[in-house]
Amino acid sequence: MAEPWLHIVGIGEDGMAGLLPATRAVVEAAEIIIGGDRHHRLSDTVRAKRVAWPSPFDALIDTLMSCRGQRVVVLATGDPLWFSVGARIGRSVNPAEIVYHPQLSAFQLAAARMGWSLPDVETLTVHGRPVEQMIAFIQPDARLLILTTGADTPGQIARFLTERGFGASKMSVLAAMGGQDEARFDGIANGWDQDVPAFNTLAVECVAAPDAALLPRVPGLSDDLFVHDGTMTKQEVRAATLAKLMPMRGALLWDIGTGCGSVAVEWMRAARYARAIGIEPRDDRRAMAARNALSLGAPKLELIDGRVPEALHGLASPDAVFIGGGLSVPVFEAAWGALRPLGRLVANAVTLESEAVLMDLHKRHGGQLVKLQVHRAEPVGGLTGWRPLMPVTQLSLVKR
């Protein structure tokens, strides 16, 4: 069995003094210490060869493996396995060769400062990631703890809150927690003007105005929240479609004929770290999808210019596939063949020709074939009547 040679140590603002005696001994015995400038400053009493985070950061694994056989310590902030470097290293280095030494995380410290129960809080990071991804968590009475990406991040988030009718939300920036220079900055989103340190954690208590935008993570957002040209999967059908696609944590969706991206965006909002690739040949619709992804909190939506089935070659195998446009037998067969075991495929059709394709596929592959019909109440002169949307034929299958 491999012997541990790599120690990943969480360190706080109180430096070496805040470490457990056994952990402190590990750091003091290190031959090589890898970390950022701040980590080296917090451990500057230890004599060891110092190595800075490599650039690009992905080179870290090569740097570590070149040190194998020596006593190596990687310093991280707080808990190395909570939105930190430990998870990245653990995917590439044999876990039997690693020992983790957690410290109190920024989330734990921030929750203690705010008097919040961690199980009742959403913990997020936008550190080195698109800030827009926090938008999906803006909901009435939600409490958010957010690892930021710099001094400007709280202002960006204050703007997101205000634009969505949550301008009265309370915001607290917590910096240098646990250290001599610990500081706190409080304010309200619609009047946020604080000058804060670059390294900080943000606490948000969401307060909704009566006209606030309600953006639940359960699929079925209003059509009006999307920029579109009228050709889109409508709200009621979208909710039914996503129920069959079954969004799951970290799962990948292929959205074929993504249009304005409504299905892909809602897929990504519905489950933590869910990913989506939208394939769309029209430039204007890809532009709409990109705008919707940013405004609704799914900034990592990947958009591909191409026609199917050719555009599907070389893509990562999906956990789910939605065919909303470009339906044909070759497209279905290519998507079905790429789908992972237990993957879900849903195809919607509004034309008679596409419906005929689905009926043929249903005969050959089984699954569930349904017709969805939605009527919406709309004015008819001075009265109100039912106006039907185009009926949608839907085929859904699970790959066994």
Image (cartoon, helix red, strand yellow):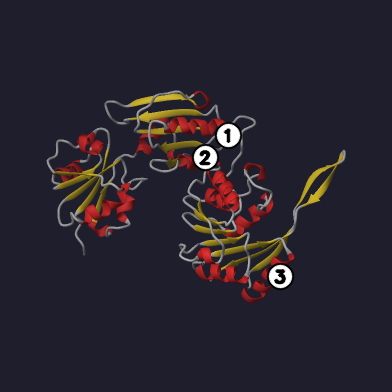
**Cβ–Cβ under 8 Å for marks 1 and 2:** yes
Q: Residue at x 21, y 64 (%)?
A: 1
Q: Is residue 399 visible?
A: no
Question: In the picture provided, is 49 more to the left or to the right than 98?
Answer: left
52 above or below 96?
above
Point out the tag, 3 or 2, that comes first from the N-terminus.
2
What is the C-alpha distance between the residues marked 3 and 2? 40 Å
* Residue wearing tag 3: 356
Residue 352 x/y as whole percent = 74, 66
**Cβ–Cβ under 8 Å for marks 3 and 2:** no
Q: Residue at x 30, y 55 (%)?
A: 90
* Residue wearing tag 2: 135
Q: Residues within 10 Å of mark 3 (few under 14, many from 20)?
A: few
What is the C-alpha distance between the residues marked 1 and 2? 9 Å
Mark 3 vs mark 1: in front: 3
* Residue wearing tag 1: 164
- Residue 173, by quadrant, is top left
Point out the tag, 3 or 1, that comes first from the N-terminus.
1
